[in-house]
Amino acid sequence: MDFVSGLRAALQDVLVPELKAIQVRLEHVEQGLERLDQRLEGNEVENKRAFEALLQRMDAHQARSDQRFEALTREMNQRFEANAQEHSAMLQTMALMNGKLDVLITLVADLKEVSYLKARLEVVEREVADLRARR
């Protein structure tokens, strides 16, 4: 067993410093990971705050957009109503004008008939005058 204990002691002499160095490096890595975790947690908190602020800004923008859309919709509806009223008034005016135009057309037709009758009367008057003059 002397050989085994000697081998064991030799291995321990070689491996123990290496294991301790590995252990020290592992502790440094763990510490670095802990610092990294802390930084990530800090970044997560900051990112969450920034995200919440962004959401609030988006909500405010959405509210302003909704208000503007409602205002534009009201304005558009008012304009449509005004146009509809104006169109109705124009149709009424056109109906009145058509009635007056019908009266004018009737008057022109009557005037033509009167002119024809006047011309015919003049012819008859000349013929009567000729007949009187011959007697």
Image: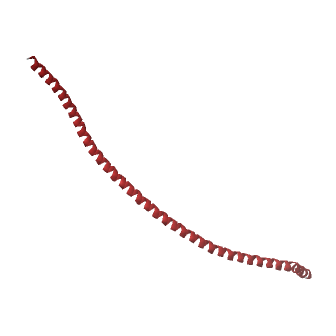
Furthest residue to the left?
135
Horizontal side, residue 83 vs residue 24: left or right: left
Residue that appears at 29% across and 47% down? 93
Residue that appears at 60% across and 71% down? 50
Locate residue 79, reporting x and y percent: 39, 55
Locate residue 84, reporting x and y percent: 35, 52
Name the one closer to the observer, 30 or 4. Answer: 30
Locate residue 69, reporting x and y percent: 46, 61
Choose top left, top right, bottom left or bottom right for residue 7.
bottom right
Q: Above or below — where is 74 with respect to 119?
A: below
Locate residue 23, reporting x and y percent: 79, 79
Q: Quadrant of the N terminus?
A: bottom right
Horizontal side, residue 115 vs residue 85: left or right: left
Residue that appears at 65% across and 76% down? 42
Q: Above or below — where is 49 with respect to 126?
A: below
Choose top left, top right, bottom left or bottom right for residue 4.
bottom right
Residue that appears at 38% across and 54% down? 80
Give the colouring mode of the picture: secondary structure
